[in-house]
């Protein structure tokens, strides 16, 4: 019987250290990304806004004879002026409505505690108030709400929000101002004979992502305004605040409008049964219009993704990075599709040659 020969595999010390160094570098990179995730979210929001404003900057740059700084400053000032005007028109109403809603909360809670009103069934049937009291008695407010140091947390949140807004505004400005320069620097790293190809790819990616961003903002604006009008007609209070909620949630592809519809329908039913029925009917009709008319125009003409690809992209993005991941999923998928199509086209051309 032949004895089995032992086989030894020798690795050079340099190879071992290279593998270890690569693993350590990847681990450090992932750790840094996780620590700076909030800053990365700000960068993504600034990029989102820059892509939405860039067509206006490009148009003004051509009108101003190539002076991009002046064009960028004009667009940013106009955007800030529009936001300030909207705020001056709606913020007082929004604050008044939020205050009114806050004043009504004790009445809602009193009805709920005593099993009265439209929410009374939560106590009479499901004993929700009793369960909340038990949780509060056993674990205190910390266990019930998961909050400690509420005042400190609110203060930190306000400061963080202010810093985030200021930072995002400046990042958006510099992205608009220096974007073309950075793109030219990236193209400068590519070989001269390959630059025309990658410039074409870059134009396709910009058209895909920019068209999606602009279209998505327009769809959300339509959703928020139309909802606010319906709520105003039906006499539902807080229609400005609720319309704003719909506009923000509708930015989330696929699921955003449904989530907004559920929230608004609940508020409408609390106001009156006819208002709730009309709001539900409105959202059903609007969902059909958005899904079969508005979104196909945006996704079909800009991103050119199938509904299945959109759904899978959004689910993966939401799983990886929550709401921001869902927002970025479709532009990322569209970008990957542009790159893949270009790769396959050049591969077929090389094979044919």
Image (cartoon, rainbow, N blue to C red):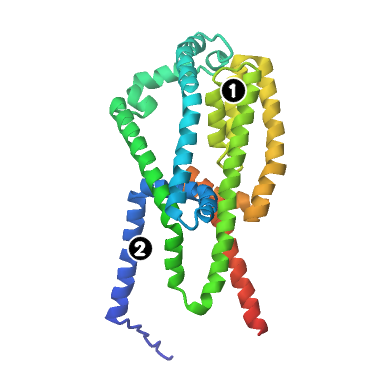
19 w.r.t. 5: above or below: above
Q: Secondary structure at mark 1?
A: helix
Q: Position of residue 72 (x, y in %)?
A: 45, 49
Which is more toward the observer, 248 or 75? 75
Q: Is residue 256 visible?
A: yes
Q: Position of residue 310 (x, y in %)?
A: 62, 51
Mark positioned earlier in the residue sequence (2 or 1): 2
Please identify the quarter of the rendering in which residue 279 is found. top right
Q: Quadrant of the C terminus?
A: bottom right
Residue named by callout 1: 266
Residue named by callout 2: 26
Which is more toward the observer, 80 or 33? 80
Q: Quadrant of the N terminus?
A: bottom left
Q: Secondary structure at mark 2?
A: helix
Q: Position of residue 328 (x, y in %)?
A: 52, 50
248 w.r.t. 300: above or below: above
Name which residue lies at 35% across and 18% down: 137
Q: Which mark is residue 68?
A: none
Crowd tier of the residue under label 2, counting other residues whose Cα lies within 10 Å: few below 14, some 14–19, many 20 or above: few
337 w.r.t. 6: above or below: above
Q: CA distance from mark 2 to mark 1?
A: 47 Å
190 w.r.t. 104: above or below: below
Horizontal arrangement in the rendering, residue 216 relative to residue 88 (left or right): right
Q: Position of residue 145 (x, y in %)?
A: 38, 26
């Amino acid at each position: 019987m032949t004895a089995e020969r032992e086989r030894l595999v020798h690795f050079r010390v340099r190879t071992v250290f290279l593998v270890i160094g690569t693993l350590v570098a990847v681990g450090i990179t992932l750790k840094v990304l996780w620590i700076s995730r909030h800053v990365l979210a700000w960068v993504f929001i600034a990029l989102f806004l820059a892509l939405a404003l860039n067509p206006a900057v490009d148009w003004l740059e051509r009108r101003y004879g190539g002076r991009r700084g002046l064009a960028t400053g004009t667009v940013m000032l106009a955007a800030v002026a529009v936001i300030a005007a909207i705020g001056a028109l709606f913020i007082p109403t929004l604050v008044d409505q939020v205050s009114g809603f806050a004043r009504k909360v004790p009445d809602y809670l009193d009805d709920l505690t005593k099993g009265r009103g439209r929410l009374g069934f939560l106590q009479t049937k499901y004993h929700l108030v009793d369960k909340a009291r038990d949780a509060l008695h056993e674990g205190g407010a910390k266990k019930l709400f998961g909050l400690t140091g509420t005042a400190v947390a609110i203060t930190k949140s306000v400061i963080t929000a202010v810093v985030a807004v200021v930072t995002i505004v400046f990042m958006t400005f510099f992205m608009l101002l220096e974007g073309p320069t950075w793109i030219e620097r990236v193209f400068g790293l590519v070989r001269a004979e390959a630059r025309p190809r990658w410039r074409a790819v870059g134009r396709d990616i910009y058209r895909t992502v920019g068209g999606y961003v602009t279209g998505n903002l327009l769809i959300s604006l339509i959703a928020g305004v139309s909802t606010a009008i319906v709520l105003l007609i039906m006499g539902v209070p807080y229609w400005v605040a609720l319309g704003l909620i719909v506009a923000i949630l509708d930015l989330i592809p696929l699921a955003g409008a449904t989530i907004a519809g559920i929230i608004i329908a609940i508020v409408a039913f609390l106001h009156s049964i006819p208002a709730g029925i009309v709001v539900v009917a409105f959202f059903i009709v609007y969902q059909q219009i958005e899904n079969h008319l508005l979104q196909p125009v945006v996704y079909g003409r800009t991103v050119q993704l199938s509904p299945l690809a959109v759904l899978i992209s959004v689910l993966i993005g939401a799983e990886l990075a929550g709401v921001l991941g869902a927002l970025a999923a479709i532009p990322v998928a569209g970008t990957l599709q542009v790159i893949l199509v270009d790769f396959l086209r050049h591969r077929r051309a090389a094979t044919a040659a």
